[in-house]
Amino acid sequence: MKVVIISSSPNEIGLTNSCVEIAKETLEKEKIETEWIVLNQYNIKKCEACGKRGWGICLEEHRCRMKDDFNDLKQKIDAVDAMIIVTPVYFYEMSESAKTFFDRLKRCESFDENSYLKNKNMLCIACAGGSGDGTENTLHSMKILAKFLHMNVVKQIGVTKKNFEEMKSEIVEGTKALVLGGENE
């Protein structure tokens, strides 16, 4: 089994990366092959809604015509068995780098009946460094993302600076459920 962790925080010592480390350590203890992709380290442009009526080759060929790092990352993701998304909460939403990447992924995967992601498990973690008010909205948008990717949300976890210590066990449990079966939300 192989799991990809996709994070989108430029802060290498912040709350988001702390949550990633917990999930990564849990996977390693279970001897699960893991790849950590930090979206901020890649050149991913925003969707241009190209072609006629706003659809380019993404609709038929399920890839993007733009020449950046997106298609290479999509190929990596297609090859995994499960996905963990960990994003900081910015203005009640996923980070800009996560939105940009996942907007394009949705366009490539939503109408692909043979999608490699179909029926695979996803764990969603939203990390709010401020008040934490935006975690619920961010988790909701991640659930919508899973719907369009045809993936199963195993668990959604909202983490704040105030609840981080108690949420560590939730991250471990959610990560184990992702690979061993278990909860579905």
Image: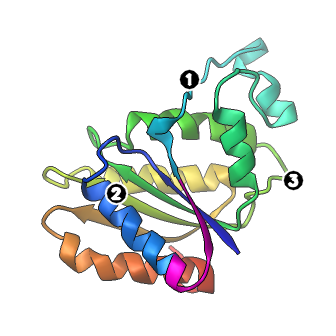
Secondary element type, mark 2:
helix
Q: Choose the circle earlier in sequence order: 1 or 2.
A: 2
Where is residue 28 shown, x and y percent of the image?
Answer: 53, 78
Residue position marked by numbered label 1 in the rendering: 45
Q: Secondary structure at mark 1?
A: loop
Q: Relative to 110, is 179 above or below?
A: below
Residue 151: image location, x then y, percent = 65, 61
Label 3 vs 2, first from the N-terminus: 2
In this rendering, the count of numbered labels is 3
Q: Is residue 181 visible?
A: no
Residue that numbered label 3 is attached to = 114
Residue at the spot of label 2: 17
Q: Is residue 13 above or below residue 68?
A: below
In this picture, which residue range is highlighted in magenta?
A: 28-36
Residue that appears at 71% across and 39% down: 72
Q: Is residue 163 left or right of residue 96?
A: left
Camera-nearest label, 3 or 2: 2
